[in-house]
Every structure is written in C-alpha cells, then in structure tokens.
C-alpha cells in the first residue's frame, strides 16, 4: 500500500492540476497520505515543490484539520510554519484550535504564519484566537497582526488598538505601532476611536517627530473613514 500511495502522490505532484479522481483515491487512504506528505514537506528543499505539497496536503485534510494535529509540535520550526500555512489554506473554522496551539511557538516566523492563516480564515473564532498576539513580546508580531486586520469591526481588537494609540511610547517602534493602529481603526470604522483621533488631530505638540506622525495619521484617518459620518 505504501508504494501505491507514494506513486500516486508523486504523480499528482507532477501533474499540472490534481485530477478529482486521483484526489478522491488519495482521500480514501488519508491517514497514510498525510504521513507521506508531511514527510515530504519536511525534507523538500524547493520552494515551488513545497507549495505544491502544501496545496495537496490541504486538499487531503479538507474538513478534517485534526489530521495535522499530531505533527504540529514538531521540533522543526520550518515544518511547523508550513503546517500553519496548510491550516490556513483549508479555510475551515475547525482549523482555528490547531492554529491556536502554535500561537506561542518560540520561532517568530511560525507565529507570523499563524497570524496570516487566522486572517485568511476570518470569522469570530479566528479573530478571537488572534488576541493572544496582542501581548506578543515581539513588536514585529504585534505590527503584523495589526496590518492584517480588515474592515470587520471587532470590539476587543478596537480596544487594544486604542490603548496603543493612547500610550506614551513615542519611540520609533512605538510610533510605528501607533500609525498602524490608527489605520486599522479607520478600516473597521470603530466609533469609539473617533473622539480619540479627533483629540490627537487637534492637539498642539510642543516637540517630537513621533507625535507629528501620529497627528498626521489621525487626520488622515478622520478624513478617510469618518468625514461622511
């Protein structure tokens, strides 16, 4: 059986597009196919080939993201990152708990991929799972989380973004987070942000480039998202 599964996988990876009949055959032996595909994914050096393996893996486990659970705590951050990508490609809310299991992974690149996957999934469960990144120790992760926020209003996220805008951190890193937070609040048109942004836009700063940048961002957000309301 293993030889048959390996041969089928090899043929499907070479095909321009997996045939439905071949995919159906592979799903009948999903447990073994997942083992083979994960092993290939861990050892494949080529980026394009890895992408094909990820796509095929997502097709095989569609509707059953739990099949990937045994592999998520691999010592290979590289494999964990790719599996996070696969979970995002499944586009199923059932993938959210498995992505949450990787949310505190020590490797920055894995956490970044988890954020991207949760943003792709969307929905209330995915947005709730993103909250763990609000307190991430790496500012790059917090910024990536903010940049991926769309137009759907989320009160928890809006509250966190407002704390960033109102913080006293005007270091280059802090100012960057503030600008991103203002833009995200504008995208989701958070009503509670308007008075805060108006205050920032009117305030007369005595000094500080970071404060001027925040003021410009607030004025732009007010003109873009709130001027007609």
Image: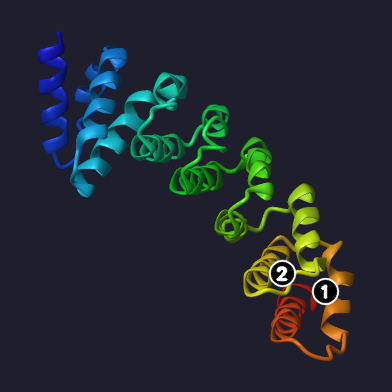
Q: In this view, does 193 lie above or below 116?
A: below
**Distance from label 1 to label 2 (Cα)?**
8 Å
The N terminus - image quarter: top left
The C terminus - image quarter: bottom right
Q: How crowded is mark 2: few (under 14 residues within 10 Å), some or many (20 or more)?
A: many
Q: In this view, does 165 lie above or below 158?
A: below
Residue 154 is tagged as: none
Give x and y (percent) for residue 180.
64, 67
Which residue is disc 2 drawn over?
Answer: 182
Q: Determine the residue positioned at 29% across, 18% down.
A: 27
* Circles 1, 2 touching at the beta carbon (< 8 Å): yes
Q: What element carries label 2?
A: helix
- The answer to whether residue 149 is left or right of residue 17 is right
Q: Determine the residue positioned at 24% across, 28% down.
A: 20
Give x and y (percent) for residue 159.
81, 54
User: Residue 220's image quarter?
Assistant: bottom right
- The answer to whether residue 153 is left or right of residue 148 is right
Give x and y (percent) for residue 24.
26, 20
Q: Determine the residue positioned at 74% across, 86% down.
A: 208
Which residue is disc 1 drawn over?
Answer: 197
Q: Is mark 1 on a helix, strand or loop?
A: helix
């Amino acid at each position: 059986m293993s030889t048959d599964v390996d041969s089928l996988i090899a043929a499907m990876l070479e095909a321009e597009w997996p045939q439905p009949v071949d995919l159906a055959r592979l799903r009948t032996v999903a447990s073994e196919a997942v083992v083979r595909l994960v092993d290939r994914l861990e050892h494949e050096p080529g980026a394009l080939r890895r992408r094909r393996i990820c796509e095929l893996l997502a097709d095989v486990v569609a509707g059953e993201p739990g099949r990937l659970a045994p592999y998520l705590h691999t010592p290979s951050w590289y494999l964990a990152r790719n599996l996070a990508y696969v979970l995002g490609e499944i586009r199923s809310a059932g993938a959210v708990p498995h992505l949450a299991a990787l949310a505190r992974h020590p490797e920055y690149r894995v956490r970044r991929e988890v954020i991207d996957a949760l943003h792709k999934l969307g929905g209330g469960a995915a947005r709730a799972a993103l909250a763990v990144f609000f307190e991430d120790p790496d500012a790059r992760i917090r910024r990536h989380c903010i940049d991926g926020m769309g137009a759907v209003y989320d009160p928890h996220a809006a509250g966190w973004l407002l704390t960033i805008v109102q913080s006293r951190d005007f270091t280059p890193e802090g100012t960057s987070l503030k600008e991103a937070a203002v833009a995200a609040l504008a995208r989701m048109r958070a009503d509670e942000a308007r008075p805060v942004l108006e205050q920032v836009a009117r305030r007369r700063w005595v000094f500080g480039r970071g404060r001027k940048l925040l003021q410009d961002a607030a004025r732009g957000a007010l003109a873009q998202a709130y001027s007609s309301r």
